[in-house]
Every structure is written in structure tokens, then in C-alpha cells.
Image: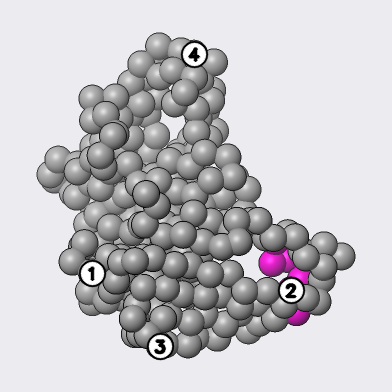
Amino acid sequence: GAVVSQHPSWVICKSGTSVKIECRSLDFQATTMFWYRQFPKQSLMLMATSNEGSKATYEQGVEKDKFLINHASLTLSTLTVTSAHPEDSSFYICSAGNQGLALSYEQYFGPGTRLTVT
Amino acid sequence: TQLLEQSPQFLSIQEGENLTVYCNSSSVFSSLQWYRQEPGEGPVLLVTVVTGGEVKKLKRLTFQFGDARKDSSLHITAAQPGDTGLYLCAGRVTGGGNKLTFGTGTQLKVEL
């Protein structure tokens, strides 16, 4: 149980184009989904938190107009990188969770999407 | 300023050796988790600790949560090549909701 998928797993796009990444919770309903980016040999940095049916909350320094997040259902959140540039190349990882017992709330991570902008 | 500092950053050891990874902060966490991540994949949860002073064991891995809930450690006994990976601690700051803050990471390589 608690499987999260991402699509695509790997994408190469040209500078100036937009790319959409999907994150799905396959066997549970996710009230909250999180988007992270990770540069090589570094840790995960939280970009934004999305709650189903409401606007995403972005971390400081993350441009909300560049990284569009939509959480239209309890099983799907999308991240669109608009007008991508080479510096946006990174590993993007989503996670999904559901509010249960407050102390045992856990996030389940997707396998990640490698974005390369040429 | 990184909220959660891990040490060491990199560790290369021989099979059979023991090691300890530390995760330190000046903030108090309501819960703390340890993950292992392999290249090109998402992090995989190893353990969650929620009580100050708590010790959890998972086969050769021993996790400890500090009494004040500001730090944690991961000890691996008799490391094996299959333990190679990026180890990440991540915590929820008390009063910070469900948002996870990740540590700086420890890259472990276990050689034959």
C-alpha cells in the first residue's frame, strides 16, 4: 500500500518550453501533496505544499508563477515548470500524505522525475 | 541556514565496519524520520521516531531520538555494500504542521 507514482520519470525539453509533471497516489487519497527538488548529491528542498482544492503554499524563494501547482483531486497533483531554462534542470520529487494521527503522519515519496533543459 | 545538519557528509568504509550518522538541530521536532535514497529514485522511509529518548532497531540499523527531540542518530552495525546510499533525516518542527524539513544528507559507500 501507499504507492506514489510520477510521470514522466525522465524528460528533456528545450529552453523556453513548459513541462508538466504528474504525481499520483495509487492506493490512497492524499489530502496533501508536497513537491521537492533535488540537485546532484544534495538533499531535498521543499518547493511547495498543495492541498486538494486549494491554492498551493510556496516556500520562500520559489516563484509561484514559474512552478505552477494544481491539486485538482485527492489522487493527482501536477507541477508545471513554465518557460524552463537550463538552471531548472533538476530531480523533482513529490510526496503524498493523509492526515491521520498527528504524530504518525507520514509522507510517501514518488520515484522522482529527472528534468533536463537544453 | 540549514535547519538540520547531518554529519558526516560523506563516508566510505569497508564491509563489516560499524558507523554512526548524526542529525542535529537547534529546533525541537514533533517527529523525525530517516530515509535512504538510491540514485535516480525517491527516498524510502526507514523509521519514524516521535518520543524523546526513543530507540528503534531495524535489523542492523539502530535509530535514536535525542531526549530533547532536537537530534537523532543512525548506527549501522556490520555494514554491507547493500547499505550504500544517501541517508537523509527529516523532521517536523513542533508547530510547523505536516511540512518535512530534510537534513543535509550523508552519502555512504560500503566497499567489499
Count of numbered labels shown in the rendering: 4
| Residue indicated by mark 3 | B53
Q: Are marks 4 and 3 in contact (CB under 8 Å)?
A: no
Q: Is residue A117 left or right of residue A47?
A: right
- Which badge, 1 or 2, is on the more N-terminal residue? 2
Q: Which residues are magenta?
A: B78-87
| Residue indicated by mark 1 | B94
Residue A62, magenta (yes or no): no
- Residue A58 coordinates in the image, percent (x, y): 23, 40
| Residue indicated by mark 4 | A14
Q: Residue at x 28, y 34 (%)?
A: A61
Q: Secondary structure at mark 2?
A: loop
Residue B79's tag is 2
- Residue A99 coordinates in the image, percent (x, y): 22, 67
Residue B83, magenta (yes or no): yes
Quadrant for residue B49, please give it.
bottom left
The local crowd at label 1, few if under 14, some if 14 to 19, many if 20 or more residues have their Cα within 10 Å, is few
Residue toward you, B93 or A33 = B93
Amino acid type at circle 4 is Lys
* Chain of the residue where label 1 is placed in the rendered structure: B
Residue B71 in view in this figure: yes
Amino acid type at circle 1 is Thr
Q: Are marks 2 and 4 in contact (CB under 8 Å)?
A: no
Q: Secondary structure at mark 3?
A: loop
- Which badge, 2 or 3, is on the more N-terminal residue? 3
Same chain? Circles 1 and 2: yes
Q: Extreme right residue here?
A: B112
Quadrant for residue B112, please give it.
bottom right
